[in-house]
Image (cartoon, grey):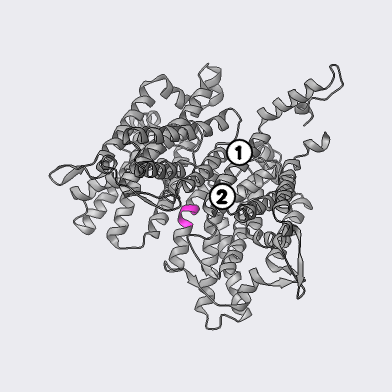
Amino acid sequence: MTDTPVALGARPSLRERADRFRARRASWIPVSAAVGILVVMFAVGQAYFGNFLTPRVLSSLLLDNAYLIVLAVGMTFVILTGGIDLSVGSVMAFTGILCARMLSEGAPTGVVIPLVIVLGALMGLATGVLVQVFEVQPFIASLAAMFAARGLAFVVSLSSIKLEDPFVLALQSTRLAGGGWYLTPTGIIAIATVVIAALVLHFTRFGRTVYAVGGSEQSARLMGLATARTKVLAYVISGTCAGIAGVLFTAYSGAGYPLNGIGTELDTIAAVVIGGTLLTGGTGYVLGSMIGVFVYGTIKVLISFLGAEQSWTRITIGALLLVFVVVQRVIVARSSRS
Amino acid sequence: MKLLRHRLVWAVAALVTLIVVNTISRPTFLSITLQDGELYGSLIDILRNSAPLMLVALGMTVVIATRGIDLSVGAIMAVSGAVALTVIEASPTPDNLGVVLVAIAVAALVSLVLGAWNGLLVAVLGIQPIIATLVLMLAGRGIALLITGGFITTINSEPYQFISQGYVLGLPFAFLVSIAAIVVVALIERRTALGMLTEAVGINPEASRLAGVRSRGIVWGAYIASGLLAGIAGILYSSNIMAADANAAGLYIELDAILAVVLGGTSLAGGKFSLAGTVVGVFTIQTLKSTITFLGVPPAVSPVFLAAVVVIVVLVQSPRTRSALARLTRRRTPAGGARIDPEAAS
């Protein structure tokens, strides 16, 4: 357990320096572990199948999981403040089906897409207000939002709606290709979300407050930080991301469907945790969450390469989640002792 | 006024309101008919159909009292149903009572082990309950699918069907199972010190440890109980449809169960719990679902109603609303009246 895959090349003779480095960079260890797992999976896949590490497979990794990356970014904000958002999968389904329905009825794309994203943000705002103003536990508040969004998705349509809007379809079908690699607009949006979120978290006052609130809400409040606004905003960001993910998923699947995204909130939380964000809040990186999503996606690809049943995906994710949580537990225990 | 402040009052009020609404919209709602010594009627249906949720919610109450949460109950239901039906399917004589009893025993044992696994992660390894049980929630349905080989196992077994369809003493057997569970849990928790110790662990784990409470065993036991009860719920569910559907069995039941517990006035923050509240909460949710179906709302849209109920309940229970209400009532009482502040009194 002590030899967690640490990304540093210290020799035993440099033990002291290694320890100091580890203590200072403890929060990066889970992220490095996720990167390590990803690399190992790539290596094993390549060694076993021979045709695993191809540009096509790696490009599709980003394409297939673009919506999940966006969801994970939003979830990271919420978890960093010490909360949880169970509504992301349902909000994604709701905004997705609404987007498809309005487009199919001839509403202009330039209106529909901003509108559904704003709707996602509003659902996040509702959750945030319940959590902050009415002191409802995040779990219950986002549960209510989850039920509401899922029901609303069925109010919009009971069956799937085919997407015919050229712009939204182009988000998925446009390929910036080169040497077998390709990048779709959905992938670009996902990466842009990660970059913007990382910049916000590390270079703005709001970002620092997010970490402060997650570390110790009381201390943050006593320091005069705007804890209430920050916590509500975290849910708004998560809702906004769910709105964007709704558009991305609709583009990806080519249709809106009210049953989309059942269980996606769990996949998202799992990806965020695997990416090294502590559920107690205060520690974690959006970059890690993206790695977590890639780990999740790679497991899926490996299992389909193996020709095994997809039910193994969930089992593997569960097992991996367990390993990471135990590793985090050990790290936290060690760092609090020193 | 004192009655209004009782923690069960809102849950009971919601249940009564639902029953009144139902009775007005369909007068036959309250009528119960006796046919061949067996009772039939909407209320009886609600009692019967609420059995799986009742079992799960009872276990959830105890887990929540220890400051925990068990997200894996739905997955455990799926596994338990899959195990029981696979055992019966593999047997050449599915109508044999012995075979069915063995199947139930194996399924109960498996769910007990799964509950113990959750307890191990939470009580021994000290992992947050929400994550520890998320592991099994994710993996459990996959395991259930592997047990059934990716198919929906269906069986024909007279004794197994009896569990959900049969009648004993004029009452549905499933309802009697849930009554038995309520009685057993209530006796263990309230007629021994266990309930008090559970609350102690939930209110302040550190203080109760210093006071000599063996919190590890108590927390572990709570998850084992929750797992076992979920397993029995899984048997009831699979007996109702006579099939093991790994994807649909117990889907979202963890959320319904948590909702029932919260409706019943038990705080998710742990500590004091109310089994009677949970029972009322379960009936409220089941009646609400039956109402929604009766009103002709597509079942798929029903989550909107559940969401509305959740929001109303949490708003009513939230400290801010309560203090606002208290301020309103205080303004109405004459100044200088010897009125105890409700916040201080509670």
The circle drawn on residue A78 is: none
| Mark 1 residue element | helix
The circle drawn on residue B302 is: 2
Q: Quadrant of the N terminus of chain B?
A: top right
Judging from the image, mark 2 belongs to the subunit labelled: B
Spot occupied by residue B60 in the image (x, y as percentages of width and height): 63, 50
Total of numbered circles in the picture?
2
Amino acid at dot 2:
Ser
Question: In this picture, is A301 found above or below B146?
Answer: above
Q: Residue A290 falls in which quadrant of the image?
A: top left
In the rendered structure, which segment of residues is drawn in magenta? B136-140
Q: Residue A179 falls in which quadrant of the image?
A: top left
Question: In this picture, is A185 found above or below B30?
Answer: above
Residue B316 is covered by the magenta coloring? no
Spot occupied by residue A232 in the image (x, y as percentages of width and height): 50, 28
| Mark 2 residue element | helix
Magenta residues, dominant SS class = helix
In the picture, measured across the screen, residue A241 lies left or right of residue B259, that is left
Residue most extreme to the bottom = B92
The circle drawn on residue B311 is: 1
Check disc 1: other Cα within 10 Å, few if <14, some if 14-19, many if 20+. many
